[in-house]
Image: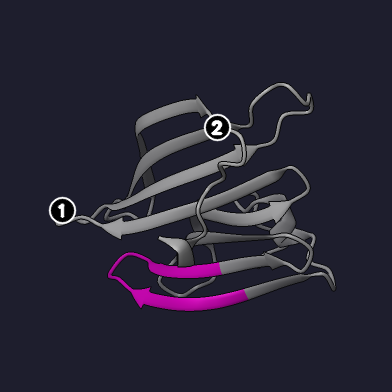
């Protein structure tokens, strides 16, 4: 099913020995099934995806990347998630990119996004805020265990 579903990100179809795909949770709803999938590359990164399938599981209805975490070279990403009282999931994604130049500061991007799923199993994504700032020397994104 994964190989013939155009709605999925490419690396779901190009599974290899360096990648783990882990089904973390599933929820059966009247019109769809909601799956939480962790995609993990052994070198650097983890992405958390939500997928919806038909009630029988024979077709993927929709997919969305909810959060990313990783560290690779001059890139670092973290995401914080929290549910709201109205059925949405708020995700704050922070991404740090090191400057290539010695005298230029590293840049921190921060994006807050709300995710929801319709009764038909389609994902609705709404960006609530976006910010960017230069980091002070030796300042970095705090890891989840540092917060």
Which numbered disc covers residue 136? 2
The residue drawn where x is 79% and y is 28% is 100
Q: From the top left corner, tell me how far across and down residue 70 is, in percent.
A: 64, 56
| SS for dot 1 | loop
Q: Is residue 40 visible?
A: yes
Question: Which quadrant of the structure image shows residue 106?
Answer: top right
- Which residue was labeled with disc 1? 86
**Image height check: is 90 above or below 23?**
above
Query: What kind of secondary structure does the magenta stretch mostly adopt?
Result: strand
Query: Is disc 1 in contact with disc 2, using a CB cutoff of under 8 Å?
Result: no
Q: Nearer the viewer, mark 1 or mark 2?
A: 2
26 in magenta: yes
Query: Which quadrant is home to the C terminus?
Result: bottom left
Q: Is residue 63 visible?
A: no
Q: Which residues are magenta?
A: 22-37
Q: Residues within 10 Å of mark 1 (few under 14, many from 20)?
A: few
In this view, the residue in front, 35 or 84, is 84
The residue drawn where x is 30% and y is 71% is 29
The residues tagged by marks 1 and 2 sit, at their Cα atoms, a distance apart of 37 Å
The residue drawn where x is 52% and y is 33% is 109
68 in magenta: no
In the visual, does 4 lie left or right of 16? left
């Amino acid at each position: 099913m994964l190989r013939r579903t155009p709605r999925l990100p490419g690396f779901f179809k190009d599974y290899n020995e360096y990648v783990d795909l882990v089904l973390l949770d599933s929820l059966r709803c009247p019109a769809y099934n909601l799956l939480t999938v962790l995609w993990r590359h052994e070198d650097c990164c983890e992405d958390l995806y939500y997928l919806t399938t038909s009630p029988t599981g024979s077709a993927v209805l929709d997919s969305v990347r909810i959060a990313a975490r990783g560290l690779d070279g001059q890139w670092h990403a973290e995401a914080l998630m929290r549910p709201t009282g109205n059925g949405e999931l708020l995700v704050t994604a922070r991404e740090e990119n090191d400057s290539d130049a010695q005298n230029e500061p590293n840049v921190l991007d921060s994006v807050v996004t709300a995710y929801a799923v319709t009764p038909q199993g389609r994902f609705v994504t709404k960006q609530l805020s976006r910010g960017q700032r230069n980091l002070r020397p030796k300042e970095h994104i705090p890891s989840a265990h540092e917060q």
